Image: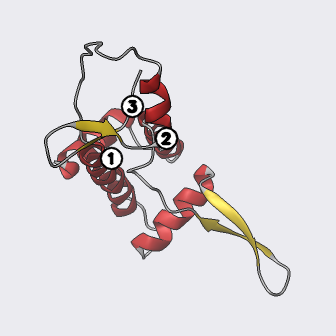
Amino acid sequence: MEVLLEKQINGSLRPANGEAWDKLRQIKAGTQLVADVKDPRRRSGQQHRFFFALAHVLFENQERYPDFDEFRARLLVYLGYFEAVKTQEGETIAMPKSLRFGKMPADEFTALVDSVLRFAEEQGFDRAELLAQTQEAAA
């Protein structure tokens, strides 16, 4: 079971949301638990750095898009991270979604990176070399 906890001023931990309260309510009072304490913001920062390093490595090795933001937007749309929005003229356009790394579960982030790597391989990139360049850039 994984729950989000919040540290209180007095040093105690308490459930940080309703889901955590519900899960912990099922445990008998006085039960000792083992916790693997992680700061989700740290993980989200690492994910953010890695994703943008990967996107920058791809951007720097392509010639179609002169602007990184446009390249990233097109990449997200290609990968399916977009919302269909109707313009005033009635045309439907794809608007890239903002990636919320702090709220993105680890498995969703892994799937995102895998999608980017599959896209890169389709463009002729070597996966292992791309990962090595990305890890170096994200460090």
Which one is earlier in the sequence, the residue at label 3 or at label 2? 3
Would you place residue 134 above or below residue 93 in this image? above
**Which residue is depicted at the point 34% across and 51% down?**
54
Task: Tell me if 15 is positioned left or right of 117 in this view.
Answer: left
Amino acid at the residue labelled 1? Gln
Amino acid at the residue labelled 2? Gly
Task: Tell me if 86 is positioned left or right of 72 in this view.
Answer: right
Reading the image, the residue beneath label 3 is: 3
Reading the image, the residue beneath label 2 is: 18
- Secondary structure under tag 2 reads helix
Q: Where does the image place residue 42, in percent across and percent down from the top left?
A: 23, 46
Q: Where does the image place residue 138, in percent across and percent down from the top left?
A: 22, 50
Q: Residue furthest right?
A: 90
Closer to the camera: disc 3 or disc 2?
2
Decide if residue 107 is in sight here: no
Would you place residue 84 above or below residue 130 in this image? below
Closer to the camera: disc 1 or disc 3?
3
